[in-house]
Amino acid sequence: MFLSIKKYITTLTLLAVLISNFILAQNDNQGYVYNVKLDLDHRLKCSGSKNFEGQFGADYSNIFSGAEVNRMLANMSLILQSSSSVDTVLYVGAQKYPPAKKGFGSLGKSVLNEGVLDTKETYRTVDFFPVLGLKKALKTKSSVYYDIDIKVKYGGDASDMIVMGEVKKNRFFEYKIDYVIEAKGQNKKLIWKKKGSFNDFSEELDGSIHKEYFRVEGRQNISSSEIEKSVLIALNQLID
């Protein structure tokens, strides 16, 4: 009987080891989005301003709530997972109080354009997206770690062109999405890097390609919904 009990315990121990190894293997075969930076060109007019809880107000400067950021992150993770060898892709959730460095934009060169000093490629970083160092992300023991950089670039805008009281040309605005994604392994080394510029969002949005940008006519303001959809469409195009 003692041998039978010992054999039973040994079997349970082996089973526990197998289950433990299976869980670890599952964990090792997951991706992890640990850093996302979304920059919006300051020349793009974006309607709506809200706080983390989604309340609108003149004093708020962000275009997405925390819940909307989490929805975007969830969809981005699904897109990454669908085109990779990992079983699942997890992500750091929306951060209400991100690190101080998150709030600084990137300032490009100032150039003289038709006699007017124009500051080009000046961005403001959209709040609430996750900022986490790779060192902390490695604690999840994932197999792939994603660092994502997105820029919503301004391509121009104009008011209605009215001649003799008649609208000859509708108002419009133009934009495109630039992406850079780096995937790193547990050894912190780069596995792959993908980047691209995207200007066709017509599968879900009203508009058309005009040279290197996507043009929307009839208004000069871009909505947060359009930015969200464009970011996801561009990611799909990058990953395909």
Image (spheres, grey):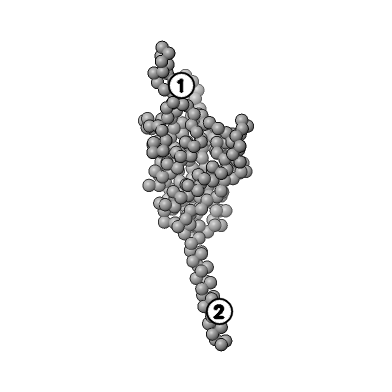
Q: As displayed, is residue 122 above or below residue 98?
A: above
Quick one: label 2, few (<14), some, or many (20+) residues within 10 Å? few
Quick one: label 1, few (<14), some, or many (20+) residues within 10 Å? some
Q: Residue at x 46, y 26 (%)?
A: 219
Q: As displayed, is residue 138 above or below residue 44?
A: below
Q: Residue at x 57, y 46 (%)?
A: 94
Q: As displayed, is residue 193 above or below residue 220?
A: below
Residue 123 visible somewhere in the drawing: yes
Q: Residue at x 55, y 50 (%)?
A: 92
How far apart are labels 2 and 1 at the CA level? 79 Å
Left or right position of 124 against 83? right
Q: Residue at x 40, y 51 (%)?
A: 83
Label 2 residue SS: helix
Image quarter where the N terminus lies is bottom right
Mark 1 residue type: Ser
Front-most of residues 44 and 9: 9
Q: As displayed, is residue 233 above or below residue 43?
A: below
Residue farthest along the top direction in this orientation: 164
Residue farthest along the bottom direction in this orientation: 1
Mark 2 residue type: Ile
For disc 2, the marked residue is: 9
Q: Residue 36 location in percent, x, y?
A: 52, 45
Q: Residue 30 location in percent, x, y?
A: 48, 57
Which image quadrant is residue 161 in?
A: top left
Q: Residue 227 location in percent, x, y?
A: 48, 37
Which image quadrant is residue 101 in?
A: top right
Which image quadrant is residue 212 in?
A: top left
User: Of the numbered discs in the image, which one, if any, rests on residue 159?
Assistant: 1
Is mark 2 in CB contact (under 8 Å) with mark 1? no
